[in-house]
Amino acid sequence: MNKQELPDWLDRHHVSIIRTHATSLDGPGLGKYLHRNKFFNSLPKGHAVSDMALTMDVNGTPHMTLWHPQREANLGDIFLKPDLNTLISDGTDPNLGHCIVDFTNDQGVPMDLCPRSTLKKMVARVAALGYEIKATYELEFFVYKESYQEIRASQFRRMTPLTTSTKGGIYNLRNAYHVKPLMDEVIKRMEWQGIQWEGWNDEAGVGQIELNLVPCDPVTAADNVVRTKQILFEVAVDLGLSVTFMAKPGSGYSSGMHIHHSLLDTDSGEPAFFDEQADQHRSQLMTQWVAGLVATMPGAVSYLCPTVNSFRRFTDYAAVPMTASWGEENKSTALRLISRAKNIARIEHRVGASDLNPYLALAVILAGGIAGVTHSLTPTEEFNKLAWGLPASPSDLPMSISQAAKCLKDDELLAEVLGASNTNYWAKTRQAEWLVFHTEGADATSHKVSQWEYDRYFEMI
Amino acid sequence: MTTDTAEVLAISTEPDPTPLVKIFANKFRKALTDAKFANYVRNFHGSFALASLKDPQSLTIIVGNGKISITHGIAANAEIIIRMDFDKPVKPKIEGLFRHPMLALRISKLLQFPETNWADAATGFWDCNSTYPGMPGNIKIHCIDEDRDFILGDLPTDGNPDMHISGKGIDIADVFSGGSVFVQALMTGRIKSIASFEHTVVLSDVTVQTLLGER
């Protein structure tokens, strides 16, 4: 859609208000509700927001110790440029439309730090290699009977999982039935917004649900995640419940966000990870791609596990990978390869926590793959045993936000593909997150989820 | 454990130390360049913990045989526990004082790290960090209690510095010697500044790294 076509679209869909939607570095949705005239008149540049919108932490505190060459000299404005191809009507609110936006400068140039633009750049890099990408995410989250206000008022002590069983289980239909009214409404709104889904089920944690989306191009896939998370939040608010994407909101299972991706040859449209003649049907592209993912994994963890709370997932035998490893149909390794058949050939990246920024997480995964191909890397040996409870080894993933940030700072491949100014800035934001965790009241000696983590992440992430 | 030596005294911390551990390791590392302090440490034997009065931050310091070990948390074998405010000079609460009165006295002396003259601190900071990307080309510092100016770098011909900082000598020394973060000193009013946003942010970044002993 272009600017000239917009008034007709707004008229036909009875949309008089447009909500713009970007994500900050940490992932929370940002934007404004705009009168249609303001939205129209601001095109193509989009509306202004403070430089701080892109350079603040998850709680909205500006980065006052982190500089990036694209920051505005004196806290000036940057812009949220609408991607009119993402314009949709809300479906529930008859007057409301939604539009995904990118952070740009005054000249309309995408900001280096913009998460969505970063993903677009990686998609373009892969396109230049001759491939298209299909990707999707598995969303895991916990649902509670209490509203956000009630949970906040109880200082996160009263959080009743919305299930039958108090022991967990998985695929349990009775547990799922408790959540069905919420999910029915969520699915309805997703479909109104054109978000295709595959299925949802009761997950292993008490009150935990998994929702799977249909694979599509990476930017749309990530757009679908941020929109679905917003829908989940809104339906929870409307029903007096609460949903959290906090990776580890309690003592039991944690939430991940596994990311599946595959490459297609741009010319032929054929799956590029699959080679009928090759050993295990893995193409050379897939082999090099996996090598890049493994080589960059310690640094990538910083993006895939962005919060202090993300690292509470890392426990042996808790369905969370502990090593930079890969294996065919191996769900204990970081990368699960599925290469037995052409039409399902793909990689499931299992490191991501549910609190990741979907744009940046997929961007860092693609960056790793790109590095593997451009440097013709050779993968580590396939791991075909159980990758939990292993003796300490160099392949162990970083187990804290500070260690992961250091790995990222030291990662020359990711710096080369994503840009050193970006990876350095991100690493410093994680160091800042580590600093505030320790200096704002969390207890480093405790293995329990801290009040600080609930306050900071439960509603916002 | 990671270990480094300063003036032949070894300082060791955990592999993934907390900010408080890094800050105190850095304090000791700098202080040990003072011969008198280093000599005091060489003759010191004892273990003690420092814990925040207002949050759960804590660490344990064990000194003896020319080694300083700093770990997070309050170790069970800490002979003295000092609960204090790490940001303000509030009277500390001391546990173990009656069992180990002499050790408590010696600890209080140990924690009196050598003070640095504000101009020396600024000069040392500038020598280490003036080429850091985004740093101002020059800084004019005005110490209000001495009513004295001090220039870091070369002032341009028009005499207008890239950055102008003013404050009491003790606060200027604190910022430039890794005692606190520049932007926090600004926000609490201890330091005043005329500078661009970029220079303010970059100087703050460098003071964070200095505080943590990373520069």
Image (cartoon, rainbow, N blue to C red):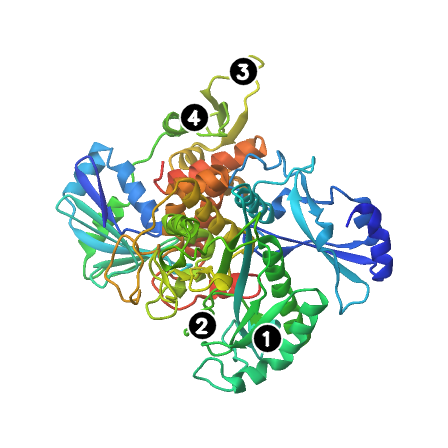
Residue A160 location (% of width, % of height)? 52, 80
Residue B81 location (% of width, % of height)? 27, 59
User: Which label is found at residue A150?
Assistant: 1
Note whether residue A153 is visible. Answer: no
Residue at (74%, 41%) from the top-left corner?
Answer: A45
Q: Nearer the viewer, residue A73 or A201?
A: A201
Q: Quick one: label 4, few (<14), some, or many (20+) residues within 10 Å?
A: few
Q: Which residue is mark 4?
A: B131
Residue A50 location (% of width, % of height)? 66, 44
Q: Which residue is mark 3?
A: B156
Q: Is residue B130 above or below residue A331?
A: above
How far apart in space, not on screen, are marks 2 and 3 (Cα)? 58 Å
Q: Is residue A217 above or below residue A178?
A: above
Q: Which residue is mark 2?
A: A250
Label 2 sits on a secondary structure element that is: loop
Specify whether disc 4 shares its chain with disc 3.
Answer: yes
Residue at mark 4: chain: B
Specify whether disc 2 shares its chain with disc 3.
Answer: no
